[in-house]
Image: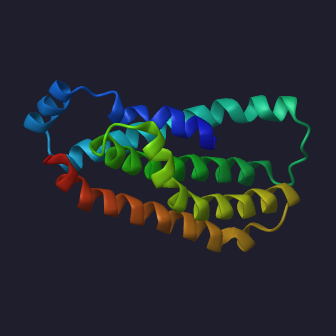
Amino acid sequence: MLFASVNAIAKSFMQESKSRLLYYYSIASPQAIILSKTIYNILLMSLLSALTLPVYMLFFDNTLGDPLFYFLSVMLGSISFSTIFTMISAIASKAGNNGTLMAILSFPVIIPVILVLIRLSKNAMDGLDRSVNYSNIGVLCAINVIVIATSLLLFPYLWRD
């Protein structure tokens, strides 16, 4: 999911031409642009995750203790990846339109998310009680809220250039 999200979301700002960005600048606010791209990327990553999870379950024989909670952790991971990579893609597009720069900038931000997702998915595979994971879900939701709030605050300054 990590590599699929990097490849899918990297194009959200980088494939836009200068004239299209100028058109967006004239008809919409920067907050509307970043929110619309974030929502689009959340939907895209959720769809990709929902389609690839059954394929992986078909080919790889992993016993899941709690399949519904595992699906929830995959969806939370796809939402987290899409919010983080959308913000980083906006920064990287203004800094030279380089996909490699996006991967480098996102590395320190994505590591805590990956660690929390590993804990969540392991607990779901082991079939532990769901109440054990409420703090991990809270951490993921807090990271998403912080990233979205940061992108809403910083994107207008990027958008002016």
57 in relation to 148, above or below: above
x, y percentage for residue 89?
39, 44
User: Which residue appears at 18% of the width and 55% of the height?
Assistant: 157
User: Which residue appears at 66% of the width and 53% of the height?
Assistant: 73
Q: Residue furthest left?
A: 26
Where on the picture, by quarter, is residue 52?
Answer: top right
User: Which residue appears at 63% of the width and 74% of the height?
Assistant: 135
Where on the picture, by quarter, is residue 130?
Answer: bottom right
x, y percentage for residue 111?
60, 61
Is residue 75 found left or right of 95 in the rendered image? Answer: right
Q: Nearer the viewer, residue 152 or 21?
A: 21
Is residue 89 found left or right of 124 in the rendered image? Answer: left
Where on the picture, by quarter, is residue 86?
Answer: top left
User: Which residue appears at 24% of the width and 62% of the height?
Assistant: 153
Q: How many marks?
A: 0
Q: Which quarter of the rendering shows the N terminus?
A: top right
